[in-house]
Amino acid sequence: MKQVITIPDLRVARAALPEPVGFVPTMGYLHEGHLSLARAARAECASVAASIFVNPAQFAPTEDLASYPRDVPRDLAMLEAEGVDLIWLPTPEVMYPQGYQTWVTVEEVTQLLEGRMRPTHFRGVATVVAKLFNAVQPQRAYFGQKDAQQAVVIRRMAQDLNFPIDIVVCPIWRERDGLAMSSRNVYLSPAERQAAVVLSRSLAVVQQAYQEGQREAEVLRKSASDLIQSEPLARLQYVSCADPETLEELQGPVAGRALVSLAVFFGRTRLIDNIVLGG
Ligand code: AMP
């Protein structure tokens, strides 16, 4: 596995890769969810490139940039074991050198859900992913459904800016008890870790209600929020039942697919999860 840091080194190493190139952008501290993206890329592409970059631009000043978990040696061993060909580890100076002032703003789909709670987040995500795409020039790029809105934003950006890249969205990987894998799960205390299963349980309750014929968006939202509010360690930020493409909140009966997504705090740790109904 070739390791590079600078853009010139990346370009040389990328040029040597057989195509199609599959690309897996990450912030590191890898888990099985990340590896599932690398495996999908490995299965579908001649070469696999990955990146590890904790992108300062997508963290608000109040968020966890400084404490975001990092273990690059472990990540490298995991990626090597998955048969990744090229790993790019840019520094903040490589991505945002002195004088940097160009940003990518995706409009409507970044104003809702996560974007409403984290107003500068998707500007940072879209900008860094555009820069990663321009540098790596993959034919396919792999993202997780875990960050459902991020996948919508990246698809929109790739289409609007004419990136000739297929955006592939892979299913959510979960722990045995249902908790969606996340690098941030490491922040949870043992009691919070146990309580955090309420996210996936509440989504299962919504799915069950849907399967039993419940279609009222407000009733579906309430069935999730009631369960989360019954967990003393959980502080619910939002539950949404929205159109999976426009992300607009659904009112009245759900017809077709619906994205049910939520964000919950455990202490200072913020977790997200989602399911798609009717998918
Ligand atoms: P991150 O390192 O958190 O920025 O995530 C990098 C990529 O891995 C993103 O496309 C995420 O959506 C994806 N990802 C994170 N957690 C999971 C998971 N539990 N299952 C599937 N994909 C995931």
Image (tube, rainbow, N blue to C red):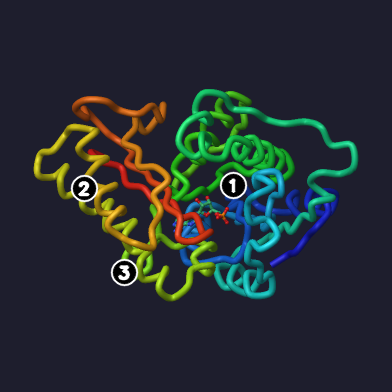
The residue located at (86%, 44%) in the rendering is 97
The image position of residue 16, as x and y in percent, is: 74, 53
Element class at badge 1: loop
What is the spatial separation of the Cα atoms under label 3 and label 2, in whole angstroms?
17 Å
Relative side of 226 to 22, left or right: left
CA neighbours of label 1 inside 10 A, class few (<14), some (14 to 19), many (20+)? some
Relative side of 199 to 256, left or right: right
Residue ID for mark 1: 20
Q: Which mark is residue 99?
A: none
Closest to the observer, 108 or 52: 108
Q: Earlier in the sequence, mark 3 or mark 2?
A: 3
Q: Which mark is residue 177?
A: 3
What is the spatial separation of the Cα atoms under label 3 and label 1, in whole angstroms?
37 Å
Closer to viewer: mark 1 or mark 2: 2
The image position of residue 210, as x and y in percent, is: 16, 42
The image position of residue 65, as x and y in percent, is: 67, 55
Q: Residue furthest right?
A: 98
CA neighbours of label 3 inside 10 A, class few (<14), some (14 to 19), many (20+)? few
Q: Quadrant of the N terminus?
A: bottom right
Count of all numbered marks drawn on residues in the image: 3
What is the spatial separation of the Cα atoms under label 1 and label 2, in whole angstroms?
37 Å
The residue located at (66%, 67%) in the rendering is 70
Q: Earlier in the sequence, mark 1 or mark 2?
A: 1
Q: Amino acid at mark 2?
A: Gln
Q: Residue furthest front?
A: 232
Element class at badge 3: loop
With respect to residue 102, does 37 lie above or below? below
Residue ID for mark 2: 207
Q: Residue furthest left?
A: 212
Closest to the observer, 3 or 215: 215
Q: Amino acid at mark 3?
A: Asp
With respect to residue 122, does 228 lie above or below? below
